[in-house]
């Protein structure tokens, strides 16, 4: 099922500047795996050495944080949008 | 005046507005959502702005104009030329002056009826609770992770709402943290990124209008909290994409295991935020490197002497266009895949804008087996200072 993944500005350096990547997957975890196999540099920015999603990066399925759904196991369906939202701190 | 706790602050209304104030605020007063009651709430309200930079500029201007009775401004910095592209509270003649002083003057001239309190200091774990305690609403317009976690924790510990905004290049995020029942910053982002992973505005750049837009949204949220009207951004993260000109909204939830605002908090007093963030943030020193430095003057002397040096410029192409010293351009991010272009038998001098990226590049090269590498101390900025004053600085 085609799923849209929205890439935030700070991580576009690792996706050939793409702001959106379409993948086919059954769960959020699968979708991110497909994404990071396509753009291997991205992986270390999303996951720590233990393979867990980094705690300054949140992943949302549509408008819900997957930490409060079934995390990586959250099922996705056609037309869903996954957002990767890292913390940013600029303000000056 | 009574001590304030909680969000949607219960602000005792001041007695009245003067005739001049009634005239000044007439466009508020004729709106039923504000009216006399709301304007008196604004007059009684006390808002602390942490940071008077890109976000703080529109925040300060609009909150002062709106008649927020007491505005606190925390900033330790002085105005410089690179600020003026976005920090619209300051003028060219303010360059070199303390931001807190210049901001006070500007806001006083905008609205002499309000009280402005300035704190020409860093917000630290030692002074944060004391500074925040007297205010009803805290607005976070800072620019680094340690201070953002500090502002969050202090707001949560004092039970004050924290109007959060942050920016990066063309993107903004806004939310209201620490309101009763709502999540805090740590619920959303339990930990900051490791050093170097997220570039700052100084490194990554920011389009000047962006903090204007995000700061205005923060100002609106602060005013809504004071008036107790509308639907504040509690439990919602507003994402703004200036290039796509799109607003999106994500749901945020209070994390029951949050170390600050959860059911069993482990952070019950302010901690060492520099340590928590692993010397991250804006003031992080250049990463330690085992590669020796060369000063701009030494480099100039050696080039003039005709030494066979390979000058490696690891900045981005658009920076090269601003100014360069004739180096070979390989941006830091491209270095791993273009390392074969370099000759390890030659002496290499790496440089960037200020010396930080080139230190990383030099360290990378050292690990890749290069032995004759020098890092230009202070980068092209120092070159402009010490060797070529005609070179533009950015």
Image: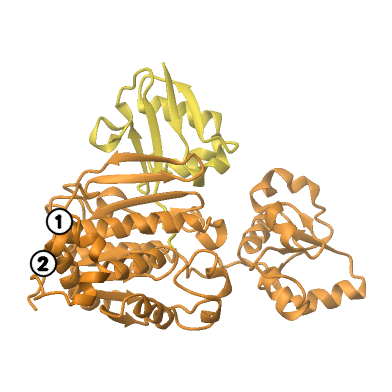
Q: Does residue B118 appear in this view?
A: yes
The N terminus of chain B lies in quadrant: bottom left
The C terminus of chain B lies in quadrant: bottom right
Say above or below: A80 vs B43.
above
Number of other residues with Cα within 10 Å of mark 2, as a class: few under 14, some 14 to 19, many 20 or more: some
The residue drawn where x is 51% and y is 52% is B169
Q: Mark 1 points at which residue?
A: B228
Foreground: disc 1 or disc 2: 1
Asked if both marks, 1 and 2, belong to the same chain, the answer given is yes
Element marked by disc 2: loop
Label the yellow chain with its letter.
A
- Place residue B204 in its image quadrant: bottom right
Element marked by disc 1: loop
Q: Give x and y (percent) for residue B199.
A: 51, 56
Q: Mark 2 lies on which chain?
A: B
Q: B351 and B323: which one is in front?
A: B323
Say above or below: B209 vs B288.
above
Q: B273 and B145: which one is in front?
A: B145
The residue drawn where x is 9% and y is 70% is B13
Residue B5 - label:
2
| Left or right, residue B118 beside residue B88 | left
Q: Give x and y (percent) for residue B349.
A: 76, 65
Label the orange chain with its letter.
B
The residue drawn where x is 43% and y is 68% is B53
- Place residue B144 in its image quadrant: bottom left
Q: Give x and y (percent) for residue B270.
A: 24, 70
| Left or right, residue A25 beside residue B229 | right
Q: Mark 1 lies on which chain?
A: B
């Amino acid at each position: 099922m085609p799923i849209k993944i929205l890439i935030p500005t700070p991580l576009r350096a690792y996706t050939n500047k793409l702001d959106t990547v379409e993948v086919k997957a059954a769960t959020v975890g699968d979708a991110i795996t497909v994404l990071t196999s396509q753009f291997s540099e991205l992986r270390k920015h999303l996951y720590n050495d233990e393979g867990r999603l980094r705690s300054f990066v949140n992943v949302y399925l549509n408008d819900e944080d997957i930490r409060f759904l079934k995390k990586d196991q959250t099922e996705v369906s056609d037309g869903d949008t996954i957002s990767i939202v890292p913390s940013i701190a600029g303000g000056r | 005046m009574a001590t304030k706790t909680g969000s949607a602050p219960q602000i005792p209304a001041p007695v009245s507005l003067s005739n001049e104030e009634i005239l000044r605020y007439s466009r508020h007063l004729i709106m039923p959502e504000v009216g006399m009651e709301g304007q008196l709430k604004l007059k009684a309200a006390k808002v602390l702005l942490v940071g008077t930079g890109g976000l703080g500029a529109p925040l300060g201007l609009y909150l002062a104009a709106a008649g927020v009775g007491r505005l606190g401004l925390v900033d330790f910095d002085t105005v410089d030329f690179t600020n003026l592209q976005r920090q619209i509270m300051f003028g060219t003649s303010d360059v070199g002056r303390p931001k807190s002083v210049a901001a006070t003057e500007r806001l006083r001239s905008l609205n002499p009826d309000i009280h402005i309190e300035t704190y020409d200091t860093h917000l630290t774990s030692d002074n944060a609770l004391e500074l925040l305690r007297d205010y009803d609403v805290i607005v976070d317009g800072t620019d680094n992770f340690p201070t953002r976690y500090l502002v969050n924790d202090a707001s949560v510990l004092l039970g004050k709402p924290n109007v959060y905004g942050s920016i990066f290049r063309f993107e903004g995020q806004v939310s209201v943290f620490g309101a009763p029942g709502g999540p805090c910053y740590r619920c959303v982002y339990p930990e900051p990124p490791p050093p170097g992973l997220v570039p700052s505005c100084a490194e990554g750049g920011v389009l000047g209008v962006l903090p204007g837009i995000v700061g205005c949204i923060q100002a609106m949220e602060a005013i809504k909290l004071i008036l107790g009207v509308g639907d504040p951004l509690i439990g919602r993260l507003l994402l703004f994409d200036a290039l796509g000109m799109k607003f999106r909204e994500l749901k945020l939830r209070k994390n029951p295991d949050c170390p600050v605002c959860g059911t069993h908090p482990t952070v019950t007093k302010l901690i060492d935020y520099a340590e928590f963030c692993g010397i991250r943030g804006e003031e992080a020193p250049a990463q330690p490197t085992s590669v020796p430095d060369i000063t701009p003057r030494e480099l100039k002397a050696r080039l003039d002497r005709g030494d066979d040096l390979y000058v490696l410029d690891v900045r981005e192409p658009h920076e090269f266009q601003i100014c360069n010293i004739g180096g070979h351009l390989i941006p830091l991010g491209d270095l791993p895949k273009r390392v074969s272009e370099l000759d390890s038998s030659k002496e290499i001098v790496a440089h960037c804008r200020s010396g930080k990226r080139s230190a990383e590049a030099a360290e990378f090269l050292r690990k890749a087996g290069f032995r004759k590498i020098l890092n230009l101390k202070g980068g092209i900025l120092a070159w402009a200072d010490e060797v070529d004053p005609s070179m533009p600085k950015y």
